Image (cartoon, grey):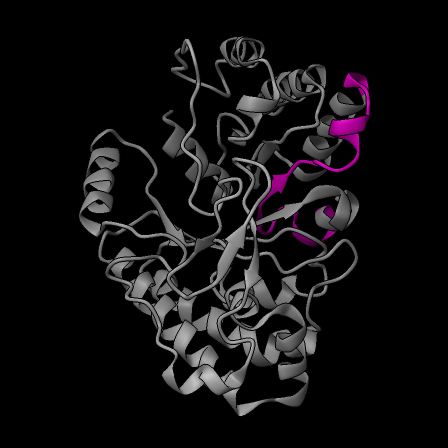
Amino acid sequence: MTRRENVLRAIRFEGPETIPMAFHINAACWHHYDQDALQDLMEAHPVLFPGFTRQPTVSPRYGLNARRDEPYTDPWGCVWATNDDGITGAVHGHPLSDWDRLDTYMPPDPATTDGTFPLDWESIAEGVRRRRKSGQLIAGGLPHGHTFLRLQDIRGYENLIFDMADDRPELRRLIAMVEEFNYQFVMRWMALEPDMMTYAEDLGMQVGPMLSPKHFRTYIKPVYERLMKPARERGCIVHMHSDGDIRTLVDDLIDDGVEVINLQDLVNGIDWIAERFAGTTCVELDIDRQAITPYGSPAQIDALIREEVTKLGSKAGGLMMVYGLYPGVPLENAKAVMDAMETYAAYYA
């Protein structure tokens, strides 16, 4: 079974061969860890890193908003800054911190950008053709932070929350502008006929969401619904990611048409996730990066991943898992995560 077939079977509860597992290494890791040691781990885990080839030196290309001491102004006019190469920055400059600028504020062109970075649609289309020819899963999507976070970047978080509380008419105008840009971007992806569309947007804090459920339903949910509708109508899988505690919002997300929900394990609670989703909606579980994997023992890491597989998985499918390695996690713990992911991927095989 190809990886594409395995993933689709997991999403559709059609009996995948294994639990799809993905291990992502943040670009900053390559200057925080010994590169040979990190490559040794990758080489020793071919299930997670198929086709891996060692390099004498790994020199990652940092995103435009992830370059130390190089502030980046995105196409919406938001200014990003970071203090570590490879770590995505935060927005420190909000182009509409004052509503007086709204009348002259213009959206970027979805023909040349995703709203965060410049792009070339011809290159994207060529990449899709290559992946389709080789039998790979075709996943398109909006950039991370496409709606709620985009509004926050443009206005500033506190301003945005007060705008929602006051139901400012200017906010309605800005939402319409952002939505139209995103809709045109989605339609460009629809023309490429992807298997899956991703709608990544962090909505949660450590406890609860960043906006009230009432304000989410008033201002954000209708936008999500319209942006996801073209994918749903074409039979394209709708994938949603959010960091943080989103327990009070997930019913609205599923109502909008989300078929794969990517959420964090411990902040939402393994038992809660199992009760809400197991056997009904495919979960792409984001394995803990705050407590056990950076500070626990390898045995605790193994126990965590085993618990998640047994509580959330089944032979029918419905579970995928992902881990993101960031600086600060001991390499022996990173190895423990890799070992457990490879071991328990075949738990139901």
Q: Is residue 195 visible?
A: yes
Q: Nearer the viewer, residue 108 or 84?
A: 84
Estimate the x, y position of residue 312 in percent, counting from the top left.
Answer: 68, 39
Q: Nearer the viewer, residue 298 or 13?
A: 298
Count of number-bearing discs: 0
Estimate the x, y position of residue 63 in percent, counting from the top left.
Answer: 43, 41
Estimate the x, y position of residue 277 in percent, counting from the top left.
Answer: 65, 51
Q: Indicate left or right for 221 with 143 as reference.
A: right
Estimate the x, y position of residue 190 in percent, counting from the top left.
Answer: 28, 58
Q: Indicate left or right for 170 with 228 as reference.
A: right
Query: Which residue: 58% across, 37% down?
Result: 84
- What span is colored magenta in the figure? 274-299
Q: Is residue 291 magenta?
A: yes
Query: Which residue: 41% across, 73% down?
Result: 179
Quarter of the rendering containing residue 252: bottom right
Q: Is residue 349 visible?
A: no
Q: Quadrant of the N terminus?
A: top left
Quarter of the rendering containing residue 189: bottom left
Q: Quadrant of the C terminus?
A: top right
Q: Is residue 196 magenta?
A: no
Q: Nearer the viewer, residue 248 or 24?
A: 24
Query: Which residue: 28% across, 66% down?
Result: 109
Q: Is residue 229 above or below residue 244?
A: below
